[in-house]
Amino acid sequence: MFQKIQQLLVVLCLCVFSEINCQENFELQSVLLDSTLTANANAIVRSEDVVIEINSVNSVVVKTRRVVTVLNKYGEKYADYYEPYDPQTKIKNVKALVYNSLGEEIKKFKRKDFSDRSMYDGFSLIGDNRYIYFDYTPVDYPYTLVYQSEVETKNSAFIEPWVPISNYNLSVEKASYKIINPRKIPLRTKEKSFEGYPIELLKGDQEISYKLSKVPALTKEYRSPSFGELIPMGKVTLGDFSLVNVDGSANDWQSMGAWQYKNLVSGRGELPDSVIQKVSELVADAKSNKEKAKLIYEFVQSKTRYISVQLGIGGWMPMKAEDVDRLGYGDCKALTNYTKALLESQDITSYYTVVYGDSDKRDIDADFASMQGNHAILNIPDEQGDIWLECTSQTAPFNFIGDFTDDRNVLVVKPDGGEIKRTKKYQPEENTLHTKATVFLQEDGSITADVVSTSEGLQYDWRYLTKTKSIKDQKLYFKEYWDYINNLNILDVELIDDKNNIIYQEKVKINARNYATKAGSRLLIVPNFFNRIKSKKPKYANRKTPLVISRGYEDKDEYEIKIPAGYGFSKLPEKKTFESIFGSYSCNIERIDESTLKYIRALKISDGTYPKEKYEEYRQFMSKIRNADKTKIVLKQQ
């Protein structure tokens, strides 16, 4: 305590000469910090000021000054600053300074001290996007880093949004964002999730500004909405813009999609006559366009591989289809465009589609037309419903998208303009896992078993890539999946991928010593051998966020249990059944004959967004299931 008082006196002495210097020193020192900002925080944004000057559609200048106090090793990532650039972007000024807890400078990084590398090292064959960055290894905590940069870009299709809170466990002392628009270029803005935050907003025809102050760190809660749904964001886009010297104008998705089609997609689909002839022969016996599309999709999978290629208009223009055909590789844009060209050669209409790809669902904003998305897929209109193709995958079945692009708004790019559509939503009853097993229990408590698991829908997606692993890794996967079975040995694995019906089957032979607990003349076993809810769900005294179950599913389990000779059972546990708004559960043990029992289990989890007040009810529901999954039966030696 005495040491802290001494440190504070030093800081106060340094401040007596100038109120301005005192304020600056206070920002740079971290001896004493507001406890509301340090609570649950790994770092604190002391201040962040972003000023964006829109001089013309071909000149946007971004000036950034960011001051962050890093409290511990988990906060170091907030002191990792980098600045991307490309042929259209010039870094005019950049520097970083590091200060100790007393606000004393201990390290300075000038432009020459920054490292420079490709944005796509290890992932891209070729690209012209690069970034500069610096490495700082701290010797003590806390420390404060000041980062300043000035960057000018000719690309105005992307205006940096205001995102004052960038992660969990990061508090914000103050942040500001200003758009200066002296030429009054028409622009559109959209504010999201401002409610509940101390934000000042000012809008004029030449200036827009947002300010925020004193926001405690957010902590991640189990099954909460995605982080992007929780934080405030200010979006800005120009009605007239430029992307790598290609001017555009758009105020809605119709016009934005038309611009993208004309400038990014159109004219990229030419193919050699020999390729068209080969594809025509491939689909000659197909009886429908859907069957033709399937054959063409599988042809693309067999002929090409995914590799990132970041050239073209800002990395948004796909490679030409003829180049993909010749080279045998491409990124998501190129492979989508190539598949589209092959389909069009057979008079099958398809549309290049822009999406946010991530297992956390993220929509293209239907109410804010702008350059969005990070991935491309293909849309084929069909009388029975839209067909969606993930063209980067060499393993995915035809017309199957997994949780990387399911159930979200996407931009379908058509010649006459853009259209917002929603990709397939998999219902709980489509996402099934059916596990059957025959289990032989021995007198010494060991077991042998033949297990057959059949998965469909998203449960297919969550499991089918196991087949791409080595035999050793396949066995390791099942040992980890059934990690509650001690002394488990995986004897044999057979994996069957039925892509035509999108069904995945896993046939596994196992044994395990001492599965049952011996107690004198009794054997105690848990009859749910192969599908248990294992983890406890966290408890919250004051839950802050809604409960989100993003994807539902159904599990069905049937195990036939052969008990050892000389053992019997007098009483079996009663059937357990639970119902709630979150789903349903039942488990039961039946007697088949004197030496055979049958365990039956059914679990359904329903997707949805529920009020935060419902979380405890959900936790209790899952806890009851977890306990029921550990139900034991007692076998007696007769």
Image (spheres, rainbow, N blue to C red):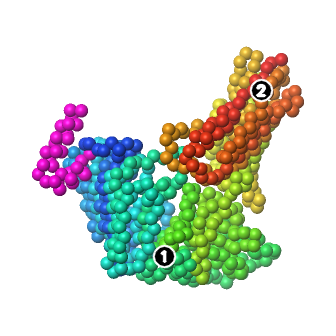
Q: Is residue 369 left or right of residue 558?
A: left
**Span colored in magenta:** 1-30
Based on the displayed image, in which of its 4 quarters is residue 478 positioned?
Answer: top right
Q: Is residue 352 left or right of residue 90?
A: right
Based on the displayed image, in which of its 4 quarters is residue 556 positioned?
Answer: top right
Task: Give neighbour class at mark 1: few <14, some 14-19, many 20+ (Cα, 10 Å).
Answer: some
* Residue 84 vs residue 410, the one in the foreground: 410
- What residue is at 79 percent from the left and 20 percent from the top? 636
* Residue 577 vs residue 482, the one in the foreground: 577
- What residue is at 44 percent from the left and 82 percent from the top? 247
Q: Amino acid at mark 2?
A: Gln
Q: Which residue is mark 1?
A: 312
- What residue is at 68 percent from the left and 58 percent from the top? 426
Q: Amino acid at mark 1?
A: Gly
Q: Which residue is mark 2?
A: 442
Position of residue 460 relative to residue 55, above or below, is above
